[in-house]
Image: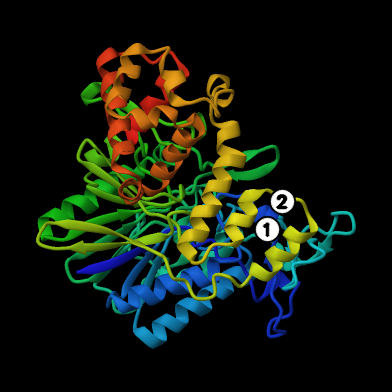
C-alpha cells in the first residue's frame, strides 16, 4: 500500500486574485519579488509546484493523499476555492482521494482575520496593498476576498476531505464518535476555542490514517491567535481526552491488524536533538527551539501508541526518533528542498521516500515581473541568482540561500558568531585546540569562512540526507568529527562550539 503526504502547499490565489483580479480576465495577481525573498517560502510558484506534485503522484500510481495543513496561503475563500478546483479535477480524472487537516495559515479560530498583501499584475509594476480591512487608509485597495476564514468556515469549505465521513471508506470516526454533523467539533462545554476536527479514516483495507487537528487557539490582545509554537504541548493540555482516544485507536489497530499512521500539521518531537537516553535534548537555534514541542509531549504520544507521525509546518525534510515514536518531517513544495513524501506500508513495515521536485512546468510565470522589479530597484545578488535559476530545484536553492543571508544569519546567532561571518574556520578553531586538531585531516576546510559553515547548517537542516548527499563528503566528515570531539570534551562555551553542537545534532 502506498500513500502520498504533502505539506504546506501555501496555495496563492494567482488567477482569482482575491477579488482584485477578475477571474477569466487572463491577468494574474502576483506577490512582489521583495516579499518573496523576505519569506521562508515562495508564493507565485505555488500553483505550478502543487500541480507538479500531483502529476508525479499520479505517475507513481498513488491514489490516496494526505494534506498536512497550510494548503492555502492565509485561508481566503478564493485561495481555498482554487485548491478545491484542483483537487476535484484530480478526483474526477484520476480517482484520487484527499484527506486534509488544518495548519496555522488555513483558519483563525472562532473569528475571521483581516489579511493584506502587496500585489502586482503580470507586468510586475506598481504594487498595491490589497486588504480586507476597509479602514486601511489609501492607497490601499479594499477587497473582502482577502479575508481569512474562521475555523467553522474552513470546516464547511473542506468538509468533504475528511471532516465528514467520505464515500467509499471502510471506517471513519472522530474523538466524539461516528457522527459527521460538523457541530460535533465543539466540546461538551461549547467553548468556541476548543474546536477539534480530528478524525480516523480507513481508505485502504488494513490502513488507518489518524488525522489530528493540532490547532489550539487563545485570546491575545483582543484577537484569536493559534498556538503554533510548541503546538503539541498546548494540544495535550487543552484536550485531555486526546491521549485516551489515541490510545484506544492504537489498541484497536493492533488488535485488528491495522497499520496505524498519524498526521498533524505540527512536529510531535523536536526536529533536532543531541545526547542519549535521559540526556536527550533539543538542539537548534532559539527561533526553532521555541517552535518545537517538549520531549514530554513526544513521550506521551508514544506511550499512547503512536509509532509513526508525519508533520509539516517547518518546511523541512527529516526524520527524528524518540521513545519508540518516529516523526517524519514532510517538506513543502514551495521551500527548499521542495517535494513531498511517499509512504509504502508492507507487512508491519513502513518505508518513507522523499520525492523531490526538480522540473516544474510554469514555475517561471512570475519571472518577467521579477525582472521588471529588479530593474526598478537596487536589489542584491540573491535576487539576480534566483531569477537566473534554470529549473525549479535551482530556484528554491537560490531562494533559500538568499533567506539565509538576509534573515537567518542576522537573527539566529549570538554576537560572537554574527561578528565572525567572514573569518576563516581555522582562526576561530584556534581558540579551542581540541577542535582545531581536527583540521589536520581536512586542511582545505581551514580556509572556509564561518558564513559558509552556517550556510551548510541551514541547508542540512532543511534538506536532511538529501542535502548531505549533495555536499562534499569531506565537509560532512569534518562536521561529524567536530561533533564527536565536542561530545568527548563536554564543553560548549564558545560560539564555534555552539555551532558545532547544532551541526552535530543534524548529522
Left-right relation of 136 to 207: right
Name the residue that disc number 1 marks: 33
Residue 220 shows which numbered tag? none
Q: Residue at x 90, y 58 (%)?
A: 138
Residue 304 placed where, x, y %? 24, 42
Q: Between residue 52 and residue 364, name the one nearer to us.
A: 364
Q: Which quadrant holds the N terminus?
A: bottom left
Residue 377 placed where, x, y %? 78, 54
Q: Between residue 172 and residue 407, name the one nearer to us.
A: 407
Q: Residue at x 24, y 47 (%)?
A: 306
Image quadrant where residue 261 sits: bottom left
Q: Residue at x 24, y 42 (%)?
A: 325
Left-right relation of 363 to 54: right
Name the residue that disc number 2 marks: 379
Residue 193 placed where, x, y %? 55, 47
Report helix, strand or loop for mark 2.
loop
**Pointer 2 and pointer 1: residues touching (CB < 8 Å)?**
yes
Amino acid at each position: 500500500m502506498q500513500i502520498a503526504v504533502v505539506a504546506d502547499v501555501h496555495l496563492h490565489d494567482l488567477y482569482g486574485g482575491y477579488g482584485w483580479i477578475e477571474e477569466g480576465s487572463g491577468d494574474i495577481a502576483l506577490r512582489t519579488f521583495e516579499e518573496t525573498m523576505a519569506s521562508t517560502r515562495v508564493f507565485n510558484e505555488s500553483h505550478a509546484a502543487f500541480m507538479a506534485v500531483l502529476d508525479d503522484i499520479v505517475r507513481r500510481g498513488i491514489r490516496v493523499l494526505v494534506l498536512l495543513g497550510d494548503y492555502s496561503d492565509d485561508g481566503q475563500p478564493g485561495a481555498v476555492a482554487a485548491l478545491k478546483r484542483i483537487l476535484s479535477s484530480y478526483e474526477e480524472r484520476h480517482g484520487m482521494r484527499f484527506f486534509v487537516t488544518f495548519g496555522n495559515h488555513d483558519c483563525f479560530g472562532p473569528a475571521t482575520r483581516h489579511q493584506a498583501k502587496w500585489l502586482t499584475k503580470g507586468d510586475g509594476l506598481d504594487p498595491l496593498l490589497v486588504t480586507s480591512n476597509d479602514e486601511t487608509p489609501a492607497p490601499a485597495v479594499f477587497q473582502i476576498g482577502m479575508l481569512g476564514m474562521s475555523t467553522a468556515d474552513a470546516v464547511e469549505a473542506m468538509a468533504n476531505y475528511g471532516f465528514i465521513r467520505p464515500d467509499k471508506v471502510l471506517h471513519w470516526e472522530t474523538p466524539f464518535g461516528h457522527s459527521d454533523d460538523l457541530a460535533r467539533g465543539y466540546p461538551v462545554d461549547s467553548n468556541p476555542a476548543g474546536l477539534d476536527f480530528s478524525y480516523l479514516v480507513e481508505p485502504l483495507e488494513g490502513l488507518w490514517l489518524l488525522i489530528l487537528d493540532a490547532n489550539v487557539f487563545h485570546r491575545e490582545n483582543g484577537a484569536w491567535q493559534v498556538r503554533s509554537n510548541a503546538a503539541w504541548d498546548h494540544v495535550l493540555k487543552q484536550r485531555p481526552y486526546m491521549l485516551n482516544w489515541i490510545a484506544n485507536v492504537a489498541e484497536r489497530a493492533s488488535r485488528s491488524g491495522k497499520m496505524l499512521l498519524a498526521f498533524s500539521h505540527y512536529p510531535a518531537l523536536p526536529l533536532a536533538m543531541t545526547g542519549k537516553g535521559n540526556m536527550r535534548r533539543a538542539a537548534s537555534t532559539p527561533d526553532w527551539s521555541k517552535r518545537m514541542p517538549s520531549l514530554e509531549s513526544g513521550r506521551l504520544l508514544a506511550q499512547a501508541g503512536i509509532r509513526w507521525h508525519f508533520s509539516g509546518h517547518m518546511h523541512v525534510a527529516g526524520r527524528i526518533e524518540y521513545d519508540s515514536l518516529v516523526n517524519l518531517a514532510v517538506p513543502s513544495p514551495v521551500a527548499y528542498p521542495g517535494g513531498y513524501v511517499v509512504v509504502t506500508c508492507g507487512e508491519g513495515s513502513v518505508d518513507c521516500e522523499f520525492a523531490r521536485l526538480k522540473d516544474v512546468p510554469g514555475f517561471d510565470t512570475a519571472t518577467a515581473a521579477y525582472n521588471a522589479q529588479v530593474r526598478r530597484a537596487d536589489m542584491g545578488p540573491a535576487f539576480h541568482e534566483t531569477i537566473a535559476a534554470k529549473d525549479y530545484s535551482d530556484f528554491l536553492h537560490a531562494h533559500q540561500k538568499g533567506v539565509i543571508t538576509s534573515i537567518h544569519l542576522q537573527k539566529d546567532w549570538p554576537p560572537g558568531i554574527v561578528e565572525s561571518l567572514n573569518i576563516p574556520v581555522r582562526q576561530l578553531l584556534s581558540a579551542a585546540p581540541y577542535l582545531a586538531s581536527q583540521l589536520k585531516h581536512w586542511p582545505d576546510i581551514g580556509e572556509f569562512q564561518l558564513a559558509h559553515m552556517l550556510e551548510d547548517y541551514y541547508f542540512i537542516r532543511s534538506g536532511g540526507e538529501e542535502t548531505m548527499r549533495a555536499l562534499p563528503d569531506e565537509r560532512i566528515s569534518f562536521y561529524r568529527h567536530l561533533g564527536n570531539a565536542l561530545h568527548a570534551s563536554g564543553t560548549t562555551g564558545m560560539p564555534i562550539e555552539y555551532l558545532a553542537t547544532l551541526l552535530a545534532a543534524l548529522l
